[in-house]
């Protein structure tokens, strides 16, 4: 299997050095060592974990429907210039009166 591993350093994602990739792959092939602090999971514990994970997923269901809209490229570039989370900002603007949207997009 081919995959690339990246790490973040000084605000930039960089490819992981080959030596680190070798250590990561060796660790992935190593046998699992169970200890008193980290015992092997029982079928009951796994079932309990699965139930809690299912409950958590259901509580995090997305309540907002996904939609596709067409906007001018200049409007989109203004939103993207706001950085990460610009789609949430766009949603907030769309929830407001149409005047705010017209002002922001310059129409």
Image: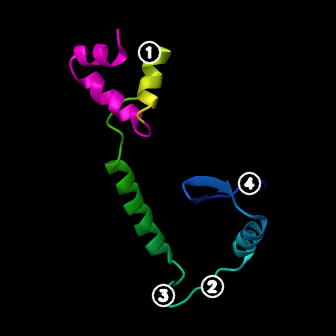
| Sequence order check, earlier mark of 1 and 3 | 3
The residue located at (51%, 77%) in the rendering is 41
Tag 3 residue: 37
Asked if residue 53 is among those painted magenta in the image, a careful observer would answer no
Residue 57 shown left or right of residue 30 in the figure: left
Write the start and end of the magenta stretch as one range.
83-107
Asked if residue 101 is among those painted magenta in the image, a careful observer would answer yes
Q: For residue 33, which numbered disc appears in the image?
A: 2
- Near-viewer residue (79 or 50): 79
Crowd rating for badge 1 (residues with CA inside 10 Å; few <14, some 14–19, many 20+): few
Position of the C terminus, as image quadrant, is top left
Q: For residue 71, which numbered disc appears in the image?
A: 1
Tag 4 residue: 3
Above or below, 88 against 50 in this view is: above
Crowd rating for badge 4 (residues with CA inside 10 Å; few <14, some 14–19, many 20+): few
Asked if the residues shown at circle 2 and circle 4 are in contact, with their CB atoms under 8 angstroms apart, the answer is no
Q: What element carries label 4?
A: loop
Q: Is mark 1 on a helix, strand or loop?
A: loop
Of all residues, the one furthest to the bottom in this rendering is: 36
Crowd rating for badge 2 (residues with CA inside 10 Å; few <14, some 14–19, many 20+): few
């Amino acid at each position: 299997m081919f995959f690339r591993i990246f790490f973040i350093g000084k605000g930039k994602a960089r490819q992981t050095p080959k030596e680190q990739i070798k250590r990561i792959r060796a660790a992935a092939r190593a046998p699992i060592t169970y200890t008193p602090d980290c015992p092997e999971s029982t079928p009951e514990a796994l079932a309990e974990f699965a139930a809690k994970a299912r409950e958590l997923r259901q509580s995090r269901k997305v309540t907002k429907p996904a939609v596709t809209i067409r906007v001018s490229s200049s409007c989109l570039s203004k939103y993207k210039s706001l950085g990460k989370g610009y789609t949430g900002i766009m949603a907030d603007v769309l929830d407001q009166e149409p005047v705010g949207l017209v002002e922001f997009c310059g129409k």
